[in-house]
Amino acid sequence: MKQLTNMNVQIVSDKQAGGKAGFQVFENALQNGAKVLGLATGSTPVTIYEQLVASDLDFSQLTSVNLDEYVGLSADHPQSYHYFMQQHLFNAKPFAHSYVPDGANLDAAAATSEYDQIIADNPIDLQLLGLGKNGHIGFNEPGTDPESTTHKVTLTASTIDANARFFDNADEVPRYAYSMGIGSILKAKQILIVAYGEAKAAAVAAMIQGPVTPDVPASYLQTHPNVTVILDEAAASQLD
Ligand code: F6R
């Protein structure tokens, strides 16, 4: 059997169990003094956020920093990632400060350098990630520079298709996003990446057992010393 690198891989029965396992990682991080939480959107983190909302954890002295945001959507747009975070976590569990890239700022140089400054001022203790079918993390698509900081991304056709389910049709999905870079993500002290379902199985195997390569942005997590991976059996099905 091939060594599963140094990542701590946990296999759970379903998304609900994944929510509980993910919650445990957050609770432990808070007990160990975490002050800045890096957060993600998409369907994967939802059960973790449900557990956080139902818990008695208090975030009112903490800071959150989100991975990414669509360019052109303001914070109050129902499909913006900012709005998603309000609905799934912030309304119930407010943080002292919550940062999401400013999608309404169309000046990419200003929006991205402002966000890099926010990350520098608030070093991330625990970063939560979902995984794209193509191996992306944040909106760092295959080919992204592993040392990248926050940048403007042109979304790939596969990501636009995957995200079209949240919009009336694919034409309404923004074509650009601001995303933390792979380099920004790797600076987090601890990383939790979660994936569910057969559609993620190939990306999971490439992330954990494949070569470290720009073709699979998540494979750079092999170079980080403290990564926990939570998978259901379908997502783990292509691991040795
Ligand atoms: C979301 C993000 C993306 C998603 C990924 C998986 O903030 O940065 O990388 O984590 O696309 O999306 P879901 O969870 O919807 O399968």
Image: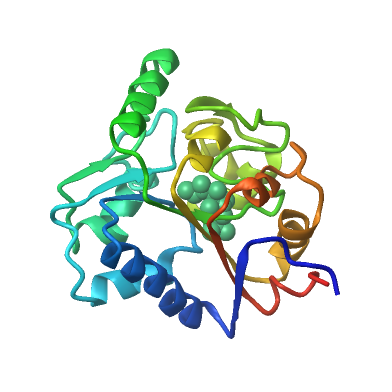
Q: In this view, does 190 lie to the left or right of 1?
A: left
User: 80 above or below 238?
Assistant: above
Name the residue nearer the viewer: 235 or 72: 235
Which color scheme does this rendered protein use? rainbow
Can you tell which quarter of the image residue 206 is in? bottom right
Residue sitting at x 72%, y 70%: 198
Name the residue nearer the viewer: 77 or 40: 40
Q: Is residue 100 left or right of residue 135?
A: left
Expressed as whole percent of the image width and height from the top left, the position of residue 24 reads 39, 74
- Residue 49 in view of the camera: no
Name the residue nearer the viewer: 156 or 144: 144
Expressed as whole percent of the image width and height from the top left, the position of residue 164 reads 57, 49
The quadrant of the image that shows the N terminus is bottom right
Residue sitting at x 27%, y 67%: 31
Name the residue nearer the viewer: 173 or 19: 19
Residue sitting at x 46%, y 77%: 21
Expressed as whole percent of the image width and height from the top left, the position of residue 38 reads 38, 49
The quadrant of the image that shows the C terminus is bottom right
Q: Residue furthest bottom?
A: 13
- Residue 157 in view of the camera: yes
Can you tell which quarter of the image residue 205 is in? bottom right
Expressed as whole percent of the image width and height from the top left, the position of residue 3 reads 78, 67
